[in-house]
Amino acid sequence: MKIIMLGAPGAGKGTQAKMLAAKYDIPHISTGDIFRANIKNGTELGAKAKEYMDKGLLVPDELVVDLIMDRFQADDCKNGYILDGFPRTIPQAEALDKALAAVGESIDYAINVEVPDENIVNRMSGRRACVGCGATYHIKYSPTKVEGKCDTCGADLIIRDDDKPETVLNRLNVYHEQTQPLIDFYSAKGVMKEVDGTVDMNDVFDAIVAILGE
Ligand code: ADP
Ligand code: AMP
């Protein structure tokens, strides 16, 4: 099963993608996580990506597309995957389409997690990320047992550099201009499904499972 998670930054794509990956036993592929790992490891790609990420801008398509095409070759992708944060532009979606069509495949579902802009800044200001395993928490909606420490691996939690309110507003503008058009793109292909992302995360999950099947 090949699934794309769509939605504004902070809508809960990553939260849902992690839960879905565990349920359906397919990999969760987050381009944002891949860039952050590259930044942490001091790679050339990480340095390039950081320039854009810190401003709330999208990393240029050519850097993202090459990276994701490589990732699809890995063995764990043979039964499908959940894409979180890719595609984010029409050219990226077209590149994905073309690569899949070349091997006779296509996307099964694009799930749009709908959260209005007014809720997003609140979501992002409370988001905390684990430096060790990448788990995501929220100080109010999904708190850790021990403040500032990851429940899973015990490492420290950080606030992402791009979760500052002024950067979040930029990211929201970029989302509306460059990523939202993908809703029409995947609607035209008949694979677009929408869920309400403002309810409890377990209820969002149940709504997605009702679409994908047990
Ligand atoms: P995205 O991957 O779309 O950027 P995340 O999954 O990281 O978003 O979620 C953003 C923040 O909102 C995180 O701190 C997460 O714990 C929290 N969150 C996710 N889903 C919900 C929800 N349904 N209700 C409240 N908070 C949520
Ligand atoms: P995310 O973790 O999905 O919120 O992504 C964090 C940041 O990484 C984004 O604001 C972009 O700067 C960059 N990024 C992640 N995925 C993409 C993509 N598909 N295209 C361009 N930039 C991306």
Image (cartoon, helix red, strand yellow):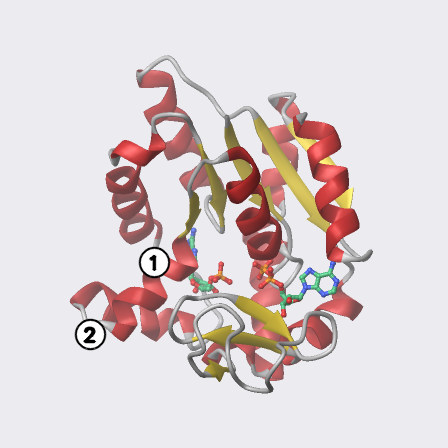
Give the residue at x 37% y 23%.
Answer: 100
Give the residue at x 28% y 38%.
Answer: 69
Q: Residue 33: image x %, image y %?
A: 40, 60
Residue 39 seen in the figure: yes
Type of the residue with mark 2: Gly
Query: In the rendered view, would you say 118 is above or below 125?
Result: above
Report if the CB atoms under discs 1 and 2 are less than 8 Å apart. Answer: no
Q: Residue furthest top?
A: 104
Left or right: where 115 falls relative to 77? right
Q: Residue 202: image x %, image y %?
A: 74, 52
Gap between marks 1 and 2 measured at Cα:
12 Å
State which image quarter holds ligand 2. bottom left
Q: Which residue is mark 2?
A: 42
Type of the residue with mark 1: Ile
Who comes first in sequence, dot 1 or dot 2?
1
Q: Residue furthest bottom?
A: 147
Tell which of 28 and 52 is nearer to you.
28
The answer to which quarter of the image holds residue 50 is bottom left
Query: In the rendered view, would you say 43 is above or below 181?
Result: below
